[in-house]
Protein backbone atom coordinates (compact mmCIF):
# COMPACT_ATOMS: atom_id res chain seq x y z
CA UNK A 1 0.00 0.00 0.00
CA UNK A 2 1.50 3.35 -0.93
CA UNK A 3 1.17 6.45 1.23
CA UNK A 4 -1.74 7.86 -0.79
CA UNK A 5 -3.78 4.65 -0.56
CA UNK A 6 -2.98 4.36 3.13
CA UNK A 7 -4.10 7.93 3.81
CA UNK A 8 -7.31 7.19 1.90
CA UNK A 9 -7.93 4.22 4.24
CA UNK A 10 -7.51 6.64 7.17
CA UNK A 11 -10.22 8.87 5.71
CA UNK A 12 -12.49 5.83 5.22
CA UNK A 13 -12.18 4.76 8.87
CA UNK A 14 -15.46 5.00 10.76
CA UNK A 15 -14.68 4.52 14.45
CA UNK A 16 -11.75 6.52 15.80
CA UNK A 17 -9.91 6.55 19.12
CA UNK A 18 -8.15 9.87 19.73
CA UNK A 19 -5.51 9.92 22.44
CA UNK A 20 -4.24 13.16 23.90
CA UNK A 21 -1.35 13.16 26.35
CA UNK A 22 -0.48 15.34 29.32
CA UNK A 23 2.38 16.94 27.39
CA UNK A 24 -0.14 18.28 24.85
CA UNK A 25 -2.67 19.40 27.45
CA UNK A 26 -0.14 21.34 29.47
CA UNK A 27 2.52 23.96 28.86
CA UNK A 28 5.08 24.70 31.60
CA UNK A 29 2.89 22.80 34.03
CA UNK A 30 -0.24 24.81 33.17
CA UNK A 31 -3.29 23.42 31.40
CA UNK A 32 -3.63 24.86 27.86
CA UNK A 33 -7.30 25.79 27.99
CA UNK A 34 -7.52 26.37 24.24
CA UNK A 35 -6.83 22.69 23.55
CA UNK A 36 -10.23 21.70 25.02
CA UNK A 37 -12.01 24.05 22.60
CA UNK A 38 -9.95 22.74 19.70
CA UNK A 39 -10.69 19.09 20.50
CA UNK A 40 -14.40 19.75 21.08
CA UNK A 41 -14.74 21.59 17.76
CA UNK A 42 -12.88 19.00 15.71
CA UNK A 43 -14.40 15.91 17.34
CA UNK A 44 -17.90 17.41 16.98
CA UNK A 45 -17.19 18.05 13.28
CA UNK A 46 -16.06 14.45 12.80
CA UNK A 47 -19.24 13.27 14.49
CA UNK A 48 -21.39 15.44 12.22
CA UNK A 49 -19.65 13.77 9.28
CA UNK A 50 -20.83 10.37 10.55
CA UNK A 51 -17.72 9.24 12.40
CA UNK A 52 -17.71 7.80 15.92
CA UNK A 53 -15.04 9.12 18.26
CA UNK A 54 -13.75 8.04 21.65
CA UNK A 55 -11.34 10.36 23.40
CA UNK A 56 -8.68 8.94 25.70
CA UNK A 57 -7.44 11.89 27.72
CA UNK A 58 -4.66 12.25 30.26
CA UNK A 59 -4.24 15.41 32.28
CA UNK A 60 -5.92 14.48 35.58
CA UNK A 61 -2.67 14.61 37.55
CA UNK A 62 -1.63 17.87 35.88
CA UNK A 63 -5.04 19.52 36.42
CA UNK A 64 -5.16 18.30 40.03
CA UNK A 65 -1.68 19.59 40.81
CA UNK A 66 -2.70 22.99 39.51
CA UNK A 67 -5.93 22.96 41.53
CA UNK A 68 -4.00 22.04 44.67
CA UNK A 69 -1.54 24.85 44.05
CA UNK A 70 1.42 22.51 43.67
CA UNK A 71 4.39 23.56 41.59
CA UNK A 72 4.86 20.13 40.05
CA UNK A 73 2.91 16.91 39.62
CA UNK A 74 3.84 15.47 43.02
CA UNK A 75 6.52 12.87 43.51
CA UNK A 76 5.04 9.93 45.35
CA UNK A 77 2.43 7.58 43.95
CA UNK A 78 0.08 8.70 46.71
CA UNK A 79 0.47 12.37 45.75
CA UNK A 80 -0.16 11.60 42.10
CA UNK A 81 -3.23 9.52 42.94
CA UNK A 82 -4.61 12.32 45.09
CA UNK A 83 -3.89 14.88 42.35
CA UNK A 84 -5.63 12.65 39.78
CA UNK A 85 -8.72 12.39 41.98
CA UNK A 86 -8.87 16.19 42.28
CA UNK A 87 -7.93 16.87 38.68
CA UNK A 88 -10.23 14.41 36.93
CA UNK A 89 -13.31 16.53 37.72
CA UNK A 90 -11.59 19.71 36.53
CA UNK A 91 -10.59 17.93 33.34
CA UNK A 92 -14.11 16.68 32.70
CA UNK A 93 -15.63 20.06 33.49
CA UNK A 94 -13.37 21.67 30.85
CA UNK A 95 -14.41 19.07 28.29
CA UNK A 96 -18.11 19.30 29.21
CA UNK A 97 -18.12 23.09 28.92
CA UNK A 98 -16.40 23.11 25.52
CA UNK A 99 -18.29 20.18 23.95
CA UNK A 100 -21.59 21.74 25.03
CA UNK A 101 -20.83 24.70 22.75
CA UNK A 102 -21.08 22.24 19.84
CA UNK A 103 -24.15 20.43 21.25
CA UNK A 104 -22.12 17.32 21.90
CA UNK A 105 -22.68 15.23 25.02
CA UNK A 106 -19.73 13.53 26.65
CA UNK A 107 -19.40 10.71 29.20
CA UNK A 108 -16.65 9.92 31.67
CA UNK A 109 -15.38 6.33 31.63
CA UNK A 110 -12.60 5.47 34.09
CA UNK A 111 -10.96 2.08 33.77
CA UNK A 112 -8.27 0.08 35.54
CA UNK A 113 -5.97 -2.57 34.18
CA UNK A 114 -7.07 -5.03 36.87
CA UNK A 115 -10.66 -4.41 35.78
CA UNK A 116 -10.04 -4.98 32.08
CA UNK A 117 -7.88 -8.01 32.92
CA UNK A 118 -11.15 -9.67 33.85
CA UNK A 119 -12.98 -10.90 30.76
CA UNK A 120 -16.44 -10.21 32.15
CA UNK A 121 -15.63 -6.63 33.07
CA UNK A 122 -13.88 -6.14 29.73
CA UNK A 123 -17.06 -7.19 27.92
CA UNK A 124 -19.12 -4.98 30.22
CA UNK A 125 -16.94 -1.97 29.42
CA UNK A 126 -17.38 -2.79 25.73
CA UNK A 127 -21.17 -2.81 26.04
CA UNK A 128 -21.19 0.53 27.81
CA UNK A 129 -18.84 2.19 25.33
CA UNK A 130 -20.74 0.85 22.32
CA UNK A 131 -24.04 1.99 23.80
CA UNK A 132 -22.65 5.47 24.43
CA UNK A 133 -21.55 5.64 20.79
CA UNK A 134 -25.02 4.53 19.69
CA UNK A 135 -26.48 7.38 21.76
CA UNK A 136 -24.22 9.84 19.94
CA UNK A 137 -22.19 10.55 23.07
CA UNK A 138 -18.40 11.01 23.03
CA UNK A 139 -16.87 8.82 25.77
CA UNK A 140 -13.85 10.41 27.45
CA UNK A 141 -11.70 7.63 28.91
CA UNK A 142 -8.90 7.80 31.45
CA UNK A 143 -7.26 5.38 33.83
CA UNK A 144 -8.78 5.48 37.30
CA UNK A 145 -5.44 6.53 38.77
CA UNK A 146 -6.85 7.06 42.28
CA UNK A 147 -7.53 3.34 42.77
CA UNK A 148 -5.11 1.64 40.35
CA UNK A 149 -2.54 -0.53 42.13
CA UNK A 150 0.95 0.65 41.26
CA UNK A 151 2.26 -2.75 40.10
CA UNK A 152 -0.61 -3.46 37.71
CA UNK A 153 -1.64 -0.32 35.93
CA UNK A 154 -1.53 0.98 32.42
CA UNK A 155 0.55 3.89 33.72
CA UNK A 156 0.49 5.56 30.36
CA UNK A 157 -2.51 6.34 28.24
CA UNK A 158 -0.80 5.20 25.03
CA UNK A 159 -1.30 1.55 25.99
CA UNK A 160 -4.72 2.36 27.41
CA UNK A 161 -5.81 3.91 24.10
CA UNK A 162 -4.79 0.76 22.21
CA UNK A 163 -6.78 -1.35 24.69
CA UNK A 164 -9.83 0.87 24.17
CA UNK A 165 -9.34 0.51 20.43
CA UNK A 166 -9.61 -3.29 20.74
CA UNK A 167 -12.52 -2.98 23.18
CA UNK A 168 -14.69 -1.21 20.62
CA UNK A 169 -13.07 -2.60 17.43
CA UNK A 170 -12.18 0.89 16.21
CA UNK A 171 -10.35 1.16 12.92
CA UNK A 172 -8.13 4.18 13.57
CA UNK A 173 -6.00 5.40 16.47
CA UNK A 174 -4.78 8.99 16.44
CA UNK A 175 -2.12 9.75 19.05
CA UNK A 176 -1.79 13.49 19.59
CA UNK A 177 1.50 14.39 21.14
CA UNK A 178 4.04 17.22 21.36
CA UNK A 179 6.27 15.93 18.55
CA UNK A 180 5.38 15.81 14.87
CA UNK A 181 5.88 12.06 14.48
CA UNK A 182 8.58 9.42 14.48
CA UNK A 183 11.93 10.48 13.06
CA UNK A 184 14.69 8.33 11.54
CA UNK A 185 16.79 9.15 14.62
CA UNK A 186 16.12 10.77 17.93
CA UNK A 187 15.91 14.56 17.48
CA UNK A 188 18.61 16.30 19.56
CA UNK A 189 18.20 19.82 20.87
CA UNK A 190 20.05 22.46 18.88
CA UNK A 191 20.55 20.15 15.88
CA UNK A 192 18.52 19.97 12.68
CA UNK A 193 15.72 17.45 12.90
CA UNK A 194 16.32 14.03 11.35
CA UNK A 195 13.83 13.13 8.60
CA UNK A 196 10.28 12.24 9.58
CA UNK A 197 9.18 8.66 8.89
CA UNK A 198 5.92 9.10 7.01
CA UNK A 199 4.77 5.52 6.87
CA UNK A 200 5.60 2.37 8.83
CA UNK A 201 4.36 -0.98 7.63
CA UNK A 202 5.97 -3.20 10.27
CA UNK A 203 7.18 -2.27 13.74
CA UNK A 204 10.36 -4.26 13.55
CA UNK A 205 13.86 -3.84 14.92
CA UNK A 206 14.55 -1.39 12.09
CA UNK A 207 11.86 0.97 13.34
CA UNK A 208 13.01 0.55 16.92
CA UNK A 209 16.59 1.20 15.85
CA UNK A 210 15.51 4.30 13.97
CA UNK A 211 14.33 5.62 17.32
CA UNK A 212 17.94 6.11 18.31
CA UNK A 213 19.72 2.80 18.58
CA UNK A 214 17.45 1.18 21.12
CA UNK A 215 13.78 1.46 21.78
CA UNK A 216 14.45 2.13 25.45
CA UNK A 217 16.43 5.34 24.85
CA UNK A 218 13.19 7.29 24.86
CA UNK A 219 12.35 6.27 28.41
CA UNK A 220 8.98 5.18 29.67
CA UNK A 221 5.93 6.98 28.40
CA UNK A 222 7.93 8.48 25.53
CA UNK A 223 8.23 6.96 22.10
CA UNK A 224 8.41 3.45 23.59
CA UNK A 225 4.80 3.35 24.69
CA UNK A 226 3.67 4.99 21.46
CA UNK A 227 5.32 2.21 19.46
CA UNK A 228 3.75 -0.35 21.80
CA UNK A 229 0.34 1.23 21.24
CA UNK A 230 0.82 1.29 17.47
CA UNK A 231 1.90 -2.38 17.57
CA UNK A 232 -1.16 -3.33 19.59
CA UNK A 233 -3.44 -1.33 17.26
CA UNK A 234 -1.83 -3.01 14.26
CA UNK A 235 -2.86 -6.42 15.62
CA UNK A 236 -6.38 -5.04 16.13
CA UNK A 237 -6.42 -4.42 12.39
CA UNK A 238 -6.29 -0.64 12.89
CA UNK A 239 -3.96 2.05 11.59
CA UNK A 240 -2.29 4.55 13.92
CA UNK A 241 -1.35 8.14 13.15
CA UNK A 242 1.16 9.75 15.49
CA UNK A 243 1.06 13.52 15.06
CA UNK A 244 1.44 16.88 16.77
CA UNK A 245 -1.40 18.40 18.79
CA UNK A 246 0.11 21.81 17.98
CA UNK A 247 -0.71 21.46 14.28
CA UNK A 248 -3.87 23.52 13.59
CA UNK A 249 -6.95 21.39 12.81
CA UNK A 250 -4.82 18.28 13.05
CA UNK A 251 -7.69 15.82 13.58
CA UNK A 252 -9.70 17.09 10.62
CA UNK A 253 -6.68 17.26 8.36
CA UNK A 254 -5.67 13.68 9.22
CA UNK A 255 -9.06 11.98 9.48
CA UNK A 256 -11.19 13.93 6.97
CA UNK A 257 -8.74 15.26 4.43
CA UNK A 258 -6.19 12.45 4.49
CA UNK A 259 -3.34 14.92 4.73
CA UNK A 260 0.13 13.54 5.05
CA UNK A 261 0.71 14.64 8.65
CA UNK A 262 2.79 12.78 11.21
CA UNK A 263 3.74 9.13 11.00
CA UNK A 264 1.21 6.59 9.78
CA UNK A 265 1.55 3.02 11.07
CA UNK A 266 -0.35 0.69 8.76
CA UNK A 267 -2.92 -1.79 10.04
CA UNK A 268 -1.79 -5.41 10.22
CA UNK A 269 -3.60 -8.72 10.33
CA UNK A 270 -6.42 -8.53 12.83
CA UNK A 271 -6.25 -10.93 15.75
CA UNK A 272 -9.59 -12.10 17.11
CA UNK A 273 -10.56 -9.60 19.81
CA UNK A 274 -10.35 -12.22 22.60
CA UNK A 275 -6.84 -13.26 21.55
CA UNK A 276 -5.86 -9.59 21.32
CA UNK A 277 -7.16 -9.06 24.86
CA UNK A 278 -5.17 -12.08 26.03
CA UNK A 279 -1.95 -10.87 24.42
CA UNK A 280 -2.12 -7.13 25.05
CA UNK A 281 -4.45 -6.45 27.99
CA UNK A 282 -4.21 -9.27 30.52
CA UNK A 283 -1.38 -9.29 33.00
CA UNK A 284 0.67 -12.53 33.14
CA UNK A 285 0.77 -13.93 36.68
CA UNK A 286 3.44 -16.51 35.99
CA UNK A 287 5.89 -17.99 33.51
CA UNK A 288 6.24 -21.49 32.07
CA UNK A 289 9.59 -22.37 30.53
CA UNK A 290 9.19 -24.75 27.61
CA UNK A 291 11.69 -27.13 26.02
CA UNK A 292 12.43 -26.91 22.29
CA UNK A 293 9.94 -29.64 21.40
CA UNK A 294 7.06 -27.85 23.09
CA UNK A 295 8.07 -24.54 21.47
CA UNK A 296 7.99 -26.20 18.07
CA UNK A 297 4.64 -27.86 18.82
CA UNK A 298 3.11 -24.48 19.62
CA UNK A 299 4.73 -22.48 16.85
CA UNK A 300 4.65 -24.89 13.94
CA UNK A 301 1.93 -27.36 14.70
CA UNK A 302 -0.59 -25.14 16.45
CA UNK A 303 -0.93 -27.64 19.30
CA UNK A 304 -2.24 -27.15 22.83
CA UNK A 305 0.39 -27.09 25.58
CA UNK A 306 0.78 -30.45 27.34
CA UNK A 307 2.80 -31.16 30.53
CA UNK A 308 5.82 -33.03 29.06
CA UNK A 309 7.28 -29.92 27.40
CA UNK A 310 7.31 -27.78 30.56
CA UNK A 311 10.67 -27.55 32.32
CA UNK A 312 10.03 -24.81 34.91
CA UNK A 313 7.10 -22.97 36.51
CA UNK A 314 7.44 -19.53 38.10
CA UNK A 315 4.93 -17.24 39.83
CA UNK A 316 1.68 -17.71 41.69
CA UNK A 317 -1.46 -18.12 39.61
CA UNK A 318 -4.85 -19.74 39.71
CA UNK A 319 -6.89 -21.65 37.13
CA UNK A 320 -7.85 -19.31 34.28
CA UNK A 321 -5.07 -16.76 34.93
CA UNK A 322 -2.80 -15.60 32.13
CA UNK A 323 0.70 -17.06 32.05
CA UNK A 324 3.58 -16.36 29.74
CA UNK A 325 5.30 -19.23 27.91
CA UNK A 326 8.99 -18.66 27.27
CA UNK A 327 11.71 -20.70 25.55
CA UNK A 328 14.84 -21.83 27.36
CA UNK A 329 16.49 -18.47 26.61
CA UNK A 330 13.61 -16.65 28.32
CA UNK A 331 12.08 -15.15 25.14
CA UNK A 332 8.32 -15.10 25.21
CA UNK A 333 6.63 -17.13 22.52
CA UNK A 334 3.02 -17.36 23.71
CA UNK A 335 0.51 -16.39 26.36
CA UNK A 336 -2.42 -18.41 27.52
CA UNK A 337 -5.12 -18.94 30.11
CA UNK A 338 -3.86 -21.82 32.20
CA UNK A 339 -6.00 -24.83 33.10
CA UNK A 340 -4.17 -25.69 36.35
CA UNK A 341 -3.06 -23.56 39.30
CA UNK A 342 0.61 -22.90 40.11
CA UNK A 343 0.94 -25.69 42.70
CA UNK A 344 -0.50 -28.25 40.27
CA UNK A 345 1.57 -26.94 37.35
CA UNK A 346 4.75 -27.38 39.43
CA UNK A 347 3.85 -30.99 40.15
CA UNK A 348 3.25 -31.57 36.45
CA UNK A 349 6.69 -30.41 35.25
CA UNK A 350 7.94 -33.03 32.81
CA UNK A 351 5.00 -35.38 33.42
CA UNK A 352 3.52 -37.44 30.61
CA UNK A 353 -0.20 -36.91 30.05
CA UNK A 354 -0.86 -40.39 31.50
CA UNK A 355 0.82 -39.33 34.76
CA UNK A 356 -1.39 -36.28 35.43
CA UNK A 357 -3.91 -38.07 37.60
CA UNK A 358 -1.24 -40.02 39.44
CA UNK A 359 0.75 -36.85 40.31
CA UNK A 360 -2.21 -34.65 41.26
CA UNK A 361 -4.85 -37.11 42.37
CA UNK A 362 -7.18 -35.61 39.75
CA UNK A 363 -7.15 -34.42 36.17
CA UNK A 364 -9.11 -31.65 34.47
CA UNK A 365 -7.72 -32.59 31.06
CA UNK A 366 -4.45 -33.23 29.26
CA UNK A 367 -3.96 -29.62 28.21
CA UNK A 368 -2.15 -27.23 30.52
CA UNK A 369 -3.22 -24.50 28.11
CA UNK A 370 -5.80 -25.30 25.49
CA UNK A 371 -5.06 -24.08 21.98
CA UNK A 372 -8.22 -21.92 22.01
CA UNK A 373 -6.89 -20.12 25.08
CA UNK A 374 -3.43 -19.53 23.65
CA UNK A 375 -2.03 -16.71 21.54
CA UNK A 376 1.40 -16.72 19.90
CA UNK A 377 3.25 -13.57 20.90
CA UNK A 378 6.77 -14.29 19.63
CA UNK A 379 6.52 -11.63 16.93
CA UNK A 380 5.19 -8.92 19.23
CA UNK A 381 8.63 -8.08 20.67
CA UNK A 382 7.33 -7.88 24.23
CA UNK A 383 10.12 -6.65 26.49
CA UNK A 384 11.81 -9.11 28.88
CA UNK A 385 10.11 -10.35 32.06
CA UNK A 386 6.46 -10.29 31.01
CA UNK A 387 5.19 -10.38 34.59
CA UNK A 388 6.88 -7.03 35.13
CA UNK A 389 5.53 -5.47 31.93
CA UNK A 390 3.19 -2.67 32.85
N1 LIG B 1 -3.80 8.93 33.71
C1 LIG B 1 -2.82 9.99 33.87
C2 LIG B 1 -3.50 11.35 34.03
O1 LIG B 1 -4.65 11.50 33.71
C3 LIG B 1 -1.92 10.13 32.67
C4 LIG B 1 -1.19 8.99 32.12
C5 LIG B 1 -0.36 9.46 30.89
O2 LIG B 1 0.12 10.59 30.92
O3 LIG B 1 -0.24 8.74 29.91
O4 LIG B 1 -2.87 12.29 34.44
Image (cartoon, rainbow, N blue to C red):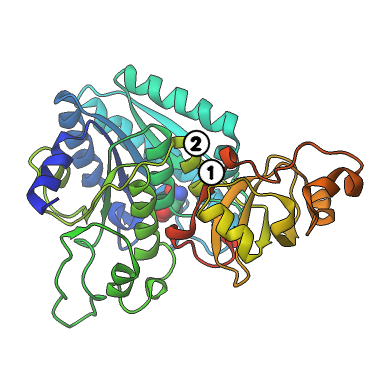
Q: Relative to residue 302, is residue 293 drawn left or right?
A: right
Q: Relative to residue 266, is residue 161 drawn left or right?
A: right
Residue sitting nearer the eye, 37 or 175: 175
Compared with 51, 276 (above or below) is below
Residue 130 visible within the image? yes
Residue at 89% of width from left, 46% of height from top? 360
Disc 1 crowd rating (10 Å Cα; few below 14, some 14-19, many 20+) is many
- Location of residue 1 in the rendering, given as x and y in whole percent from the top left corner: 14, 50
- Location of residue 11 in the rendering, given as x and y in whole percent from the top left corner: 14, 38
User: Circle 1 sits on which residue?
Assistant: 278
| Ligand 1 closer than 8 Å to label 2 CB | no
- Location of residue 224 in the rendering, given as x and y in whole percent from the top left corner: 38, 64
- Location of residue 44 in the rendering, given as x and y in whole percent from the top left corner: 20, 29
| Ligand 1 closer than 8 Å to label 1 CB | no
Is label 2 in a helix, a strand or a loop? helix
State if disc 2 and disc 1 touch (CB < 8 Å). Answer: yes
Quadrant in the rendering for residue 337: top right
Q: Which mark is residue 274?
A: 2
Q: Residue furthest top?
A: 135
Q: Residue furthest bottom?
A: 191
Q: Quadrant of the C terminus?
A: bottom right
Compared with 170, 282 (above or below) is below
Compared with 109, 298 (above or below) is below
Number of numbered discs? 2
Disc 2 crowd rating (10 Å Cα; few below 14, some 14-19, many 20+) is some
Residue at 51% of width from left, 38% of height from top? 111
Residue at 20% of width from left, 35% of height from top? 13
Quadrant in the rendering for residue 332: bottom right
Residue at 33% of width from left, 79% of height from top? 213
CA separation, marks 1 and 2? 6 Å
Amino acid sequence: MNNQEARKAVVDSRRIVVKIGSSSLTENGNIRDEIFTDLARQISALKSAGREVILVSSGAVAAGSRALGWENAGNSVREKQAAAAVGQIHLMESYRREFEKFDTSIAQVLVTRTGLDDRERFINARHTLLHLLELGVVPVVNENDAVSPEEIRFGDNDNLSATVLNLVSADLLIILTDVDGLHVAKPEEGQSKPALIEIVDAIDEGVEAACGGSISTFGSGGMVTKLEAARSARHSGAATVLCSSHEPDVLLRVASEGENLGTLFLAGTKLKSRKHWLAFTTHPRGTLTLDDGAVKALLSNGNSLLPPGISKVQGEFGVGDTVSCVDIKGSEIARGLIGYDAAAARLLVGASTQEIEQRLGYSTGDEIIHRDDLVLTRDFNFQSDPTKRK
